[in-house]
Amino acid sequence: MNKQLLLGAEAIAQAALDAGISGVYAYPGTPSTEITEYIQKSPQAKGSNVRSAWATNEKTAYEAALGMSYAGKRSLVCMKHVGLNVAADAFMNSSITGIHGGLVLVVADDPSMHSSQNEQDSRVYGKFAMIPVLEPANQQETYRITRHAFDLSEQTGLPVLLRIPTRLSHSRAVVTRSEPREQNRLTPSEEKGKWILLPANARRNYQQLLQKQQTLVSLSESSPYNGVTEGEGKRAVIAFGIGYNYTMEVISTYRLNMPVLKISQYPLPEKTLNEFADKYEEILIVEEGYPVYEELMRGYFGNDKIQGRLNGALPRTGELSPNLLEKALGVTTKEPNNIPPIVAPRPPMLCQGCSHRDLFDAINLAMEAYPQKQVFGDIGCYTLGALPPYSTISTCVDMGASITMAKGAADAGMKPAVCVIGDSTFTHSGMTGLLDAVNDQSPITVIISDNDTTAMTGGQDSAGTGRFFDLCKGIGVEEDHIRLMVPLKKNLDENVEILKEEFDYNGVSVIISQRECVQTLGKKICKKTSL
Amino acid sequence: MQKNIIIAGVGGQGILTIASIVDLAAMNLGLHVKQAEVHGMSQRGGAVESHLRISTEEIYSDLIPLGKADLILSIEPMESLRYLPFLSTEGVIVTSTEPYENIDNYPDEKELLNNIRESAASLLVEAKSIAREAGSPKTYNVAMLGAAAPHIGIDAEELEKAIRMFFARKGEAIVTTNLKAFRLGKDKSIETR
């Protein structure tokens, strides 16, 4: 069938469409966003009514995907690694209920933290939930393994976790598709005991999940995605997912004759693994992310033949690279050139004309009057307000934490307790924290920097656009203390006054600082003029 | 045949257009392609690069190993040097000369250009004037692709075919302007050899 040049993320999207999904559920997050965007733009998806609008957060996305599965249809749910923390409640319990229509969870991990707060390894979640995990090595395999994931999900009655790292998600290669499959028919589940996790049912379901584990191992043994590349010598490599690419890059470039066991389907294929490991004296474990399986193979009492991230053969943190594998496999290469000292760092920054810029100018001026100038921050473009020339933001932890941390600090006596949160982050995880503050009458000022979009990830729809006043009023913030301002240079003095008034108010106040993102505005203008 | 190319620039300058055209040409020829991109936070005015690999053989790594790039194609002069560790001993730098100054400590321009000349075999291109001559400042990228054309490992004709395909949906006028920029860039490259 036809060949296409696809990002790893797009290969997942195309494969999911060809696997007959009826819907994709997701909240944007680098490096996972492009999966859903591809489906949103796909004529194939439109033609077959695949629903694809953005969800408010990863938890609502996961639950909706589970609901679609309950109804008998196939669903895809995508998120970045930290998003699974938000969806973890639904995720963990869905392995106890099991699924009806095939359900595949794609988690895009971000080793080296290119665009994230941590580099947690989602395979740990897969192990925790005791479900099959798939980890493709390249784009073509990503396509095949995604299609396989839906079959595997229906075959085992479990959700399947598909894990990709940034590098695979954001790298293109030629992908050949296979014949698309029809969507499942609507067949809502009638098995109540399976879905009602009252303790008696949950205990039984949990036993069943445990009983399935041996089947999952057998499926990994026979999986076409796990296998051995023969070689000679006493050293060998066990390479997981994209780790296989870096290993093979070095092996093929330097024509090393070294046996490699590739693993892309978990739980571990025990027999294959044991037979392989017994043959060699030294085994390098190549994992992108945490040394999850290296730790397991090394064991508590140690195993000298196991090498990897835990003994320094590979670095403990960060993304793998061909050069790290060269070193680990003992290939000596010429020292590369250095970066000349004349090259200055060029960190990301807020766009020219960005509304956050004018907001930070106003906050900094308003803060001059107070001895404590800390401002709680959140996740989005405006996190860049932590950097000069603004240096306004003092914290960035997790989605929505700005509001609740401000509340806790206010409870401790910090005055003023001010936080900045984006519009999309507010609806994602900020509203519940605001309700806490209202109920507890904690004196905080929440500034919603509303640019009508989820800007950091490229301008996706934001769940609460146009409704922030009503949302805050509904949560119980007094109407007089829900203030609106337009962050523009000409309004600076007026905005500083609004901020000061609310900083001084001894209760919950919200300031909605509203002006459209210059990037999405630019795109709209571009579209208009080209018509 | 294998070519490893680093395409460099600043987020928002549009290095992915160059990458897409080369991808397309390589795919038309049935070559293996891998092209790693930077999405996310760095796209906001930060340094961005794309690792582009084309080969007659299977390509494993999405990233080019250090010291293995045949070409650094940069649409901003300082950015060309940021990726110097990737360049092979025989590698070439093709860069535009016009700085994109969005930082306070941008280096002295003359010193920067000298540094590039001393670092590797290099071709410095005034892409702005080429783009203007071609009829649109937006063709800056394609002019740079033209200047780098002899080092891509794909015939210029095939690259032109890919340019036509890439811009086809934007209309004939835009195709023509970009082809002109590509050819002017290529001529510049040949002149200065």
Image (cartoon, coloured by chain):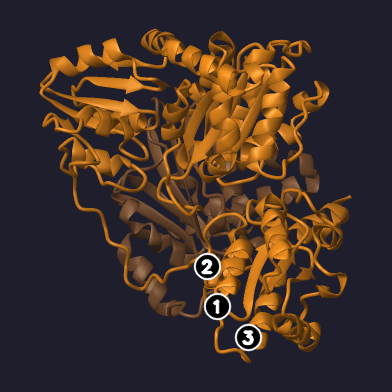
Q: Which residue bears the numbered disc 1?
A: A374
**Dot placed on the residue nearer the N-terminal end, 3 or 1:** 3
Q: Which mark is residue A395?
A: 2
Dot 3 falls on a residue whose secondary structure is helix
Where in the figure is residue A39, as x and y percent of width and height? 71, 32
Badge 3 crowding class, 10 Å Cα cut-off, few under 14, some 14 to 19, many 20 or more, is many
Given the image, what chain letter belongs to the residue carrying mark 3? Answer: A
At 43% from the left and 78% from the top, the residue drawn is B107
- Image position of A22 (left or right of A157): right
Q: Colour of chain A?
A: orange
Give the letter of the brown chain.
B
Residue A437 spot, x, y in % from top left: 68, 64
Q: Residue at x 27, y 10 (%)?
A: A271
Per the image, label 1 sits on a secondary structure element best described as: loop
Decide if residue A359 is on the left or right side of residue A47.
left
| Extreme residue toward the front, this view | A200
The reply to whether residue B147 is visible in this rendering is yes
Residue farthest along the bottom direction in this orientation? A369
Proximity of marks 2 and 1: CB atoms separated by less than 8 Å = yes
Disc 3 to disc 1, C-alpha distance:
9 Å
Going by the numbered disc 2, the residue's amino acid type is Thr
